[in-house]
Amino acid sequence: MIYEGKAITVKALEGGIVELNFDLKGESVNKFNRLTLNELRQAVDTIKADGSIKGVIVTSGKDVFIVGADITEFVDNFKLPDEELVAGNLEANKIFSDFEDLGVPTVAAINGIALGGGLEMCLAADYRVASETAKIGLPEVKLGIYPGFGGTVRLPRLIGTDNAIEWIASGKENSAADALKVSAVDAVVKPELLKDAALDLVKRAISGELDYKAKRQPKLEKLKLNAIEQMMAFETAKGFVAGQAGPNYPAPVEAIKSIQKAASFGRDKALEVEATGFVKLAKTPVAASLIGLFLNDQELKKKAKDYDKQAKDVKMAAVLGAGIMGGGIAYQSAVKGTPILMKDIREEAIELGLGEASKLLGKRVEKGRLTPAKMAEALNAIRPTLSYGDFANVDIVVEAVVENPKIKQSVLAEVEGAVKEDAILASNTSTISISLLAQALKRPQNFVGMHFFNPVHMMPLVEVIRGEKSGETAVATTVAYAKKMGKTPIVVNDCPGFLVNRVLFPYFGGFARLVSAGVDFVRIDKVMEKFGWPMGPAYLMDVVGIDTGHHGRDVMAEGFPDRMKDDRKSAIDALYEAKRLGQKNGKGFYVYETDKRGKPKKIFDESVLEVLAPIVYEKREVTDEDIINFMMIPLCLETVRCLEDGIVDSAAEADMGLIYGIGFPPFRGGALRYIDSIGVAEFVALADKYADLGPLYHPTEKLREMAKNGQKFFG
């Protein structure tokens, strides 16, 4: 062994060739943490000092190559002063450059995922050979930063500016085949031939058949574009990418600017440009929020994994209630490999549910994400039925009937008698108490809530609700089934609205107050969309359904009368009475027409003003900032209450629930991180300015205590 560490080893193979192997002890994946970087420094120095070495292949001892930097370590570095952070970044880059400058040919053998720093390690090698199953990319923009180990410098010089901008600005993972097309890798082979292919390449370079120095040279020089070509390439790309990313996500455009600034320099000066821009982005609130999201997501995955030990395997599922929701649940289960029965009492509902599943599968085939054979397989995995005849073998039943407690209790009691004793029953209710529904059951320990969000195939969140008598096996099995369906489950405790809807309705309450104060709902939508929401509150209400919102508001008012009950008639009451139910019947706050693609398009309709006129109780002049505060303060305070009441276990889960469940602006990190970004004391003072609006705007005593003690929800 030439070098042996805890993450890296270097051993002699044959004919002066050595293998630099990444295999981080105690971890399931390789990543660039401080230990790995320090050992890479030592390994490169050892190779450099050994005159007998003629070539290097770089391999991985894991199923993946290197997944990237250890963000949990690097996030602490981002708090350092700019100069220190730039210096540290350049010091790490010196390791990659010294590897690149070795006096012998180098080949990276990419056996699996090589992302971020993992791909940047490969880019520093002279040649790259990839397994057919490898995935490579630079996803840093998804964290609000851009590549910092030479990715913005080496990739454009290897695959051309246009291709590099597309890879870096999108942050996408690329297949080995796609990487070969743009020359990001030099060869693609079957997994079992990877090491032999790498050895063959390095031998050909040692023998002089391949000129590795000529292959290396473009990475050391400035970009081969003249001034006009540069202007055309970069200015066009910046305009297009800015339009795609939007104003709240600066990293993709900053990455292009960095490539542009560094275009006229050789490698070392170009790396300094990259480091300066990297540090600038690392210090932004957007990077803090998006990195926070990444860490929160890791926490969610770990929590969900902890339930695996107690979960039972779900081999057969069932959904009660077909229609759009039931069809969406059936589709999601079947397409991810769990066969499902779809029961309803009406033939037309079954047809609607099957039609929904078929439509969703058809769209996947159109986009090339599914073969026709796989579509047929998935459709065959959905078995429609009008009876409970086949329910004896079902492991979990998802009840998705009308949102009425008596009907739900009746259906659940009925199905309980048709399934085996240890089958799990789950209600897809959005607001009704799980403990209340459980009163109709003989085996309440086998019953939980499983709240999907509409549309099921697009929304990543599933709330798994633990009732007073729900057993751990029922909770764990439901979590495991949600994961199997490709969803992100969050376990919450029972209360009206659970986590997401309990927090959403105070937001709608703030909206109702604004409309009752004579504020134009179109203006409110525009302000909140500019704030970062995917759609404004009026438009969201129309999409959810005015009748659904009306019912949910009544449930929440009954559950939390002290702050959510309002005796005055609101905008939602006025629209509900006027039978303007939103997109479902073509009229709500807006009216809807079908566009060329068959999707509903919203149009302002003046007749709605007559409907809303009786509920405008005052004319209040408000700024755009007031609009944001009217809506965000109650949402944030209700999130705080959910955490304090133990409805959700952690700040991370609370924030991720809102991002995955209702599209809270990701670049703001979630409600609790949003409070942190303002400052807890400053947020409490802000809420106090709106105290006259009622209890929804009153901070809790615990939050006031946090403000006094200078505490935060994160960090």
Image (cartoon, helix red, strand yellow):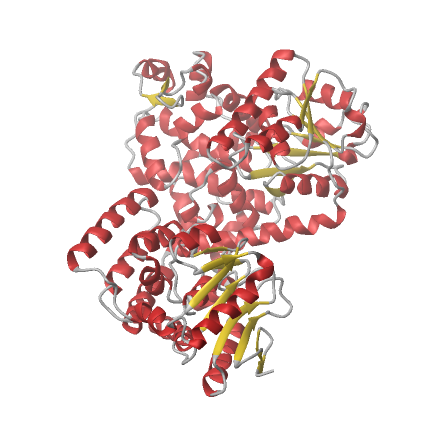
The front one of 422 and 552 is: 422
The percent coordinates of residue 121 (x first, y second) are: 45, 67
The percent coordinates of residue 297 (x first, y second) are: 54, 51
Q: Is 465 located above or below residue 108 in the figure?
A: above
At horizontal 43% and vertical 69% (from top left) the residue drawn is: 125
Q: Is 329 located above or below residue 281 in the figure?
A: above
The front one of 586 and 620 is: 586
The front one of 496 and 146 is: 146
Q: Is residue 267 left or right of residue 467?
A: left
Q: Is residue 235 left or right of residue 18?
A: left
The front one of 144 and 567 is: 144
Q: Quadrant of residue 155?
A: bottom left
Confirm whether residue 3 shows in the render. yes
Q: Is 629 located above or below residue 341 in the figure?
A: below
Q: Is residue 503 left or right of residue 259?
A: right
At horizontal 44% and vertical 46% (from top left) the residue drawn is: 666
Confirm whether residue 698 shows in the render. no
The quadrant the N terminus occupies is bottom right
Q: Is 572 located above or below residue 244 in the figure?
A: above
The percent coordinates of residue 651 (x first, y second) are: 55, 50
